[in-house]
Amino acid sequence: METKFCTIEQKAPEAEVIAQAGQIIKDGGLVAFPTETVYGLGGDAFNKESSKKIYAAKGRPSDNPLIVHIAKVEDLEKVAKNIPEEAYILAGAFWPGPLTMVLPKREDVPKETTGGLDTVAVRLPDHPVALPFIEAAGGFVAAPSANASGRPSPTTALHVNEDLEGRIEMILDGGEVGIGVESTIVDLTGDKPMILRPGFVTEEMLLRVLGDVETDQTIMLGSVAGRPKAPGMKYRHYAPKGSLVLLEGSPEKVLQAMQEKLAAASASGKKTGVLCSTEIAPFVKADVVIDVGSRQDEASIARHLYGALRQFDTENVTEIFGESFSREGFGAAVMNRLLKAAGYSVESL
Ligand code: AMP
Ligand code: MG
């Protein structure tokens, strides 16, 4: 299949491009589109054949459910039932935005879309291209991240093209995304709201409006240590082809340990890479050094993280050392992804 690559004006999306993309979804095809978190791979949420195509295009295990994207809060009732009060509080506080809610699903949402579950994950994104696209597509777009399964989520349309060219009908290029890691997922089907995946909307932000919220404690641990409640969290993800080890400690200690390890890796003929903060980047000597932002600026680290992991692959780096960052606030989302990418390999200094 030939994939149509369409550039779209983020601030004023061209109506005819949006209409064309919407029609592809209505006809059962797939379109990758930008959101404020990462690029999504969309199909009609009510068409089970579309959902099957999403799994096939990504090479995604079929028990890993998709998120249904809507463009209006009222549409929540068309996919979910027995919606608790908390859902409306969260929608009021964070929609449109990077928050996904898990709720009991309505019967007519196909199990192919929900990975066989009786619950459905729903999000109303905050993006000037995503919203008119969802409307043009009929209002209900099932979309996981638009990467090949196991690779880092795409933060540019070129990343999508790398992974999915020839496998989907269209890619809408609306420029770089703003946040860079996937949405926070909150499960509202239990006794207490529970965070299944950390994201830009932090536990503190949720506590402020809900009063009570728990976090699935397996989030920061390797899969051997527990069974995460969001099916997708159990899979190996984002891992670069080279080995990645995280170093945790003060910037001085991290820098010193890195230099020693880099020297040893170079001596044994490895191509070396470093993912680190602006604070230590000028002092590091490796074949590829990627500065993802200041240690104080989690938003910058989040925005550059996936692009950096992809770049190590592009440059065939075989031995990568990464700086470990704060796990506070939005840092929890960043470290959750970085730990997964490293296969939970962390050295404390
Ligand atoms: P992605 O956006 O590619 O990360 O994929 C969607 C994520 O949402 C996956 O990690 C799923 O595990 C999670 N998800 C989707 N639906 C549900 C659900 N009904 N219950 C729990 N997690 C879900
Ligand atoms: Mg994903």
Image: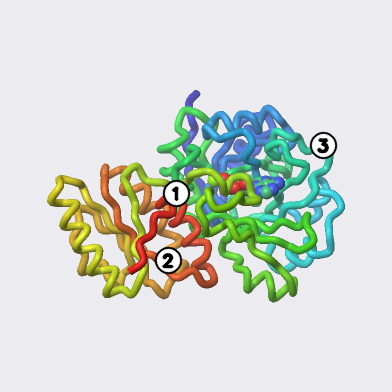
Quadrant position of residue 66: top right
Q: Earlier in the sequence, mark 3 or mark 2?
A: 3
317 sits to left or right of 70:
left
232 sits to left or right of 260:
right
For label 2, the crowd category at 10 Å Cα-Cα, with few meaning under 14, some 14 to 19 and many 20 or more, is some
Query: Residue flagged by tag 2: what amino acid is it?
Result: Ser
Q: How is the image coloured?
A: rainbow
Between disc 1 and disc 3, the foreground one is 3
Disc 1 marks which residue? 156
Q: Position of residue 326 (x, y in %)?
A: 45, 70
Q: Earlier in the sequence, mark 1 or mark 2?
A: 1
Q: Kindly check if marks 1 and 2 are in contact, taking CB atoms under 8 A apart as contact.
A: no
For label 3, the crowd category at 10 Å Cα-Cα, with few meaning under 14, some 14 to 19 and many 20 or more, is few
Quadrant position of residue 206: bottom right
Query: Residue flagged by tag 3: what amino acid is it?
Result: Asp
- Residue 337, numbered label: none
Kindly give the residue lying farthest to the top in the view shown.
1
Disc 2 marks which residue? 300
Of 195 and 93, which appears nearest the observer? 195
Q: Earlier in the sequence, mark 1 or mark 3?
A: 3
Q: Position of residue 45 (x, y in %)?
A: 71, 38
Query: Residue flagged by tag 1: what amino acid is it?
Result: Thr
Kindly give the residue lying farthest to the left in the view shown.
267
- Residue 108, numbered label: 3
Q: Secondary structure at mark 2?
A: helix
Kindly give the residue lying farthest to the front in the view shown.
225
Between disc 1 and disc 2, the foreground one is 2
Residue at image coords 63%, 69%: 203
